[in-house]
Amino acid sequence: MTVNIEKFTISSKGFDDLIDITTKVQDIIYKINKKDVVVSIAVASPTASIITIGDETGLGADFSELLDNIVPLNKIYKHDTNWHEGNAHAHLKASLLGSNLTISAIDNKLVLDNNQKIAFIDFDSKPSITQITVSVIY
């Protein structure tokens, strides 16, 4: 088994900024040029997540609203009382969704539906530049 690791950075605005990274991940798979692989996409941030989501109008906003119902922005959290950063909601949302995703690529192409994308979501209360790690296993 071989693992090929590639990294890239992404700039985000925070506050549920959802960014499509499908093309960047697919380009890494093309570059490695192995027929069938397993791909692990990870973000080393306690306030961000990697997910798959349908690439359909309004779905990102609906997803953000769903998470806001589960983890409201205007609630007083113990983390915010202790750290005074105002981003407990970001930590909690990221913990719910996780920081990595594993997906297959067959015949050098990600196994995704036509209306599905890989997305990075930044939940923090400020803009950030975050590193994404893509591990391709074959």
Image: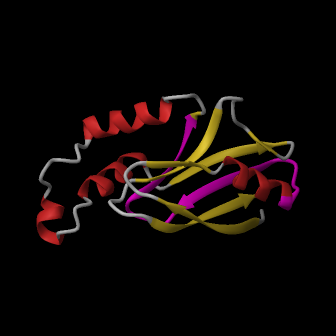
Residue located 27% across and 60% down the image:
87
Instruction: Report x, y in % for residue 24.
Output: 71, 55
User: Is the image coloured rainbow, by chain, by secondary structure, or in one colour?
Assistant: secondary structure
Instruction: Report x, y in % for residue 49.
Output: 46, 53
The residues colored magenta run 31-53
In this view, 56 is above or below 135: above
- Left or right, 89 with reference to 46: left
The N terminus lies in quadrant? bottom right
Residue located 66% across and 61% down the image:
134
- Left or right, 4 with reference to 66: right
Residue located 61% across and 49% down the image:
102
- Left or right, 77 with reference to 46: left
User: Does residue 36 show up?
Assistant: yes
Residue located 63% across and 51% down the image:
21
Instruction: Report x, y in % for residue 43.
Output: 52, 62
In this view, 71 is above or below 24: above
User: Does residue 138 show up?
Assistant: no
In this view, 95 is above or below 11: above
Inspect the magenta stretch and tell me whether residue 49 lies in it.
yes
Inspect the magenta stretch and tell me whether residue 34 lies in it.
yes
Instruction: Report x, y in % for residue 59.
Output: 49, 30
Count of marks placed on residues? 0
The image quadrant of residue 122 is: bottom left
The C terminus lies in quadrant? bottom right
The image quadrant of residue 125 is: bottom left
